[in-house]
Structure formats: structure tokens, C-alpha cells
Image: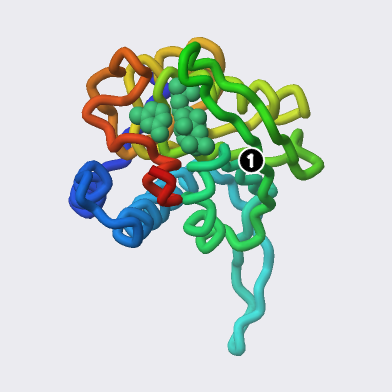
Amino acid sequence: MDNLKIVSNPLISRDITYLRNKETKEYQFRLALRRIAYALAIEISNEFELREFEVETPLEITKGYNLKKQVVLVPVLRAGLSLVNSFIEMIPNAKVGHIGLQRDEKTLKPIDYYYKAPKNLDTSKVIVLDPMLATGGSASAAFQFLKDKGANDCVMASLIAAPEGVKRLTKEHPDVPIYTAMLDRELNENGYILPGLGDAGDRTFGTL
Ligand code: PRP
Ligand code: URA
């Protein structure tokens, strides 16, 4: 699992526990998601290249830095929306695309219902946001959409991943590094991650 990067620290371990706990209320669930997303954004930013330029302080001219590439965030609807704001706070000039995918409950295959992405994906750093990487079907389909539109520098940001999803995404998109805050044990017969946190979209948006 060479492509996998697990982002861990004590605050993330505590926040994953909030997410797992079925008694956690929506507002605490959302706040924990938001905090972990900040940590993911910072870790992923280690991939970014910088452009150097001169900046004038009140005292003298010195070196300054900016991101070399435009960053494009692509949340997979719905649950991926919960990660967008933290990333935008860290990368305020990021553009945002959206991909609507819903897993068919029986086949577990993703059905696409919406796609909108900014132009110039070919020169951008494209980060797909989805808290759950389960079978990997949704993430793989999202990257295929984006690559078909020219994306060639892509990253996956997830909160909880199953080994099955990591394996599939690595096989189908070997160029995409996968960042996650937790690698869980396995999928159950319904394609849910164990121990997991349940349905991320339903728990975030209160549609249980
Ligand atoms: C969830 C999750 C991922 C997908 C992961 O979305 O947010 O997009 O399942 O599963 P996979 O790796 O097996 O494809 P879901 O289809 O439940 O839609 P929702 O976000 O609208 O609830
Ligand atoms: N989607 C979720 O929201 N949770 C899982 O465990 C698997 C897919």
C-alpha cells in the first residue's frame, strides 16, 4: 500500500472516536470532521510546489512564496461537502468542482448524477474530498471523470479507508496518493466500513 499516507496525531485519534460514537450529536460530528479536515489539508500541502517572488516588507525586499499550481477541490456529494470549508480556509483561492455520486445499495456501484469542474484541470493540483473510501468505486469513478477532463496531478483525501478501497484505487489509479486519517479493518456484506462510523452523509446532514 505504497500510495497510502496515514495522517495521525492524538487530536485526530480523539476526533475519530467522536465520529465513531453513535451517540455523537450532529454538531459535534461536524466539528470533528472539520478539525480532521484541517489536519489533512496541512499534510497534503506538503505535496505543493512553491513559486518564489520578491515581497517588500516595510523595511526591505525579501523572498516570498506562493503556490505554483492552482488547487482544485472536488468534493464527492454529499458527504465530501463536509470537508470543503476546512480546505478552503487553508487554501482560500482554491477552485471547487463537484461530483455527485451515490452508491447503489444492492450492487454498491456508484451512480453519477452531477458533474461540474473548473477549467484548466490539466495545470491544477486536483484534490478529491470524500470522508469514506469503502469499495473505492466512488473515488475511482471520480478520478476517471477528472482525468477524462485533463486532470493529471491528483490526490485523494479521506477520513476513514477500508483496505479494499485502498487496494482498488491503487490498482485503478496508481498515480494518485491516498491520504486518510484511519485505515479500518474491512467492509461488511453491505459495503460498510468496520468499525467505521456508519453512513457519513446521513450522519453529517441528519438524514438518518
Ligand atoms: C458514501 C461516501 C462515498 C461512498 C464510498 O456516499 O461518501 O462517496 O459512499 O463508498 P465506495 O467507496 O464503496 O464507493 P453515498 O453513496 O452513501 O452517498 P451520500 O454521500 O450522498 O450519502
Ligand atoms: N459510505 C459510508 O458513508 N460509510 C461506509 O461505511 C461506507 C460507505
**Residue 170 seen anywhere in this rendered image of the structure:** no
**Dot 1: element:** strand
Picture quadrant of ligand 2: top left
> What amino acid is found at the position of numbered circle 1 in the picture?
Lys
Would you identify the image quadrant in which residue 159 lies? Answer: top left
Q: Residue furthest front?
A: 208
Q: Residue at 30%, 18% (x, y): give it.
A: 187
Location of residue 194 with respect to 44 vertically, above or below: above
Residue at 27 percent across and 32 percent down: it is 196
Identity of the residue drawn at 63% across and 40% down: 125
Q: Quadrant of the N terminus?
A: top left
Which residue is nearer to you in this view: 94 or 112?
112
* Label 1 sits on residue: 125
Task: Find residue 108 and report its horizontal and vertical position in percent.
Answer: 48, 16
What is the quadrant of residue 48 in the picture? top right
Q: Residues within 10 Å of mark 1 (few under 14, many from 20)?
A: many
Relative to 74, is 150 above or below? above
Q: Position of residue 155 (x, y in %)?
A: 54, 34
Residue closer to the observer: 156 or 125: 156
Q: Mark 1: is the Cβ under 8 angstroms from ligand 1? A: no
**In this rendering, position of residue 107 left or right of residue 197:** right
Image position of 113 (left or right of 62) = right
- Residue at (42, 39) in percent of width and height: 131
| Residue 176, horizontal then vertical, whole percent | 53, 25
Q: Is residue 169 above or below residue 26?
A: above
- Horizontal side of residue 83 vs 26, given as left or right: right
Farthest right residue in view: 119
